[in-house]
Image: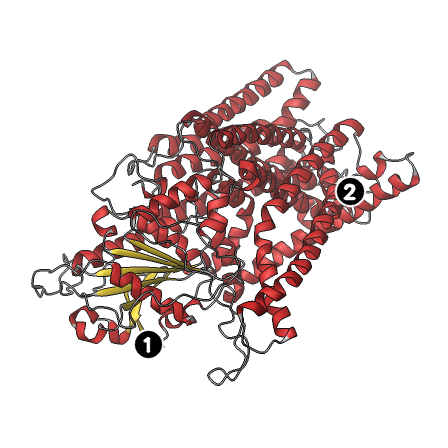
Amino acid sequence: MSSATPEPAPVAAQEPRNTGAALELLVHGVGGTTPQEMLDDPRTVRVTGDNTAAVYRRATDVRAEAEPDRFRDGPVPEAYCWCNLTSGNGTRALWLLLLPFMVVNLAHWMRPPATRHGRSARLYGVLVRLIALSLTVLLTAAACEVALDLAAWQCAGAAACTEGRSWLGFLAASEGGWWSQPGRRLTVAAAVPTALVALLWYLSHRTWSAYEAQRPPRGEDERDDRPALGRPGFWYGRRLVARLRAAHTAAGLLTVAAAVAGAAARHDRGAGDPLRAALGWCVEAALAAGAVVVVAVVCRRGRSERRLDGRVDRALVAWLPGSAAALLLLAALYASWSRPAWRSSGVLPGDAAFSVLTLGQGVLIVLLAAVALRLHRRAPDPRTVLGGLAGPAVTVLACALGGVMAGGVAQRVADWLDGPGTPGTGDGPIAGPPLLLSWQAAAIPVLLLLLLVPAVFLVVRTALAARRLAPVVEAEYAGEAADRFRTRRIAGIRAAARLTDAAPVLVGLLAAATLLLGAAGIAGTWGTGTVPAEAFDGAPPFLDGAAEACQALGSWLVGLGFILFVTWGRRAYRDASARRTIGILWDVGTFWPRAAHPFAPPCYAERAVPDLAWRMASWTGRTGGRLVISGHSQGSVLAAAAVWQLPHTTRRRVALLTYGSPLERLYGRWFPAYFGREPLTGLHREVHCWRNLWRPTDPIGGPVHLPAEHGKPEVDHPPLRDPVVYGRTDDHPLPEPILGHADYQADPAFARERAALLDRLPPALPLPVPIQRTEGPDDPDGGAAHGSSGRSSG
């Protein structure tokens, strides 16, 4: 990032030309804010929208278009507030359960550009969707492990475990009741993972109706060569999400059915009963056929972006989950068949499923990496992070998050049920969770130790960079008395802001270490058949002690992480401020549509982008005036996406002002197919005018690196000074704060650049005299006069 330089002379006159109606549409960034703060006025009025997302004006500006003389010196300000899309009511806290799904969905959009390589791009999407499907199976299998294996199979089958636990009394084998047979215990316990799958289906269906159903405006220039984010169907994934939701729901139900029926089928085959054994084979064959259908549905088709596809595959959406539910009922009936001689011991048959699932995820990730490398090498871009491997690296982290969540729940429940014993060692009443979960937990301390080295390196490098930047800072404020402490602080903040650019290296190292440790965990599970603490018995004392310490510490860390996760979610459910903090995570992670995982938190941009596009198109259509869409941070990404969606005639009347923008620094590097150099260059050509403000102290925003071309000036403004004034002066007697990512509008350059953009837009178009109308049930504009703001989003 280049250092700050003195600001050039203003590029616009102090007072803009009066060329007709003008509007500034402000879009806030992550974390959200209030319309009162955005408009700097305690009295605001909602002019269009609802309680979730809306456009506001100052109360005195509601009829601004009818009073043009009041706004000769600047545009009418409007604020679009979208923060409730990610941090609204208390149920948003449930989204914490969906974190692995959100991360794997991001990997879908990190694909390298695929110009003229459609097959490789489709294969990339198929592989990500299969990995996403494996995460649904993993989460369901974790619930089955807790409810069916640890509680119903192991604890209810051991008198020492059920003693003192009255809630397990009716299932206890020692009581000899009707429900005490293992198959019937499994049938009862299956209600827990089934309820989890039903909850995921409900959350996805509810958000699907609210988010994916927002139709973007249809322009007259729906060309095939438009960039991806400008295509009519990009922000309308209704059909795909419905189809994937049906497939993932069916996969979850089939996982529960396999856990219930698998143990009974294995018992029947070993008991020498041909009839029951044949029935078991039939049930398992039906489950396998259902799994094949689910995989085929997931692989069948991706997104349809080139047209607005409003259809829903209703037969598939209804019959696939329904058929899976019927198979689950069949499995429950089969497992509940009376088997008086059947006793449960050890772990539930099917313990190796976790290892097979983890191995399958690893194979899919390796294939995904090969496809990503192939795409990147055909069109290499040095700014793309990790050489095109960002998507595979992020899928590793998604699988690791899913494994930690699954292992954390299983380890904590096993510790609770095992009493003073250590799960997996055989010194308690139960056998414990699958061995692989113990090996994965033991790998966590090793992973943290490996990451300590690059962390220390980055700290040292940042300190050295701050020392080198000190003379640069003093040179920028030449003529003012130097203050060593002030200089050191400014240089330190600038150096720390550059740490953002080191994130790809950390993600790559973390993903590589996780993949290798995961492979080691599978090898240890299959090769030793015991937990790490016992696998190294007889080894040198150092290795033996290290294995025991890693297992104990890893189990504790997994449990602590799970407890913190639950308490964080509970606090977010009760506390709106905590929910808003968590909402920042969703602001960054849920910008993209649900293309890989239907249970991921919903894409707020599928509501926000159509909102902004409709507002810009409707206002310019009503007034013929000029419009500046002004986006800060994540709001700049929404603003750019909305401008891409506008028809050509509307884009000619719109200017784009971005500040603190991650468009190139984060999105361009991590999502090159959608925000890389070619798409951003196309946006620069298509939008009438664009200016980008940034600071060297900003850890998120940065330049977009788009030079002047085709008569349009360079997009980036020279780096803004931060602080504006170095020390105390007559005009600034108190020290000015170092703003970093905040308060760009406080910089004098903001008003100058906004005025310059308005002056470059064509004059307002003459419109017919507005006709006053009375409000009626069929009046979509609520009776507003043509030219007023109205209360309609269209």
**Is 563 located above or below residue 196 in the figure?**
below
**Which of the two residues, 403 or 328, is positioned nearer the viewer here?**
403
Where is residue 710 drawn, in percent x and y? 30, 47
**What residue would you read off at disc 2?**
423
Residue furthest top as drawn = 274
Per the image, label 1 sits on a secondary structure element best described as loop
What residue type is disc 1 on?
Arg
Q: Is residue 598 visible?
A: no
Say whether residue 182 is left or right of residue 290.
Answer: right
Few, some or many residues within 10 Å of mark 2 (<14, 14–19, 20+): many
Say whether residue 658 is left or right of residue 613.
Answer: right
Per the image, label 2 sits on a secondary structure element best described as loop
What residue type is disc 2 on?
Pro
Where is residue 467 drawn, in percent x and y? 66, 63
Where is residue 491 drawn, in percent x and y? 61, 65
Where is residue 261 drawn, in percent x and y? 60, 28
C-alpha distance separating marks 2 and 1: 61 Å
Residue drawn at the location 57% of the way across and 67% of the way down: 473
Residue drawn at the location 73% of the way across and 49% of the way down: 453
**Which of the two residues, 654 or 769, is positioned nearer the viewer here?**
654
Residue drawn at the location 23% of the way across and 46% of the way down: 648
How was the colour assigned to the protein in this rendering? secondary structure
Q: Earlier in the sequence, mark 2 or mark 1?
A: 1
Q: Is residue 4 visible?
A: yes
> Which label sits on residue 43?
1
Which quadrant of the rendered structure holds the C terminus?
bottom left
Q: Quadrant of residue 493?
A: bottom right
Q: Quadrant of residue 115?
A: top left
**Is 727 located above or below residue 375 in the figure?**
below
Q: Quadrant of residue 475?
A: bottom right
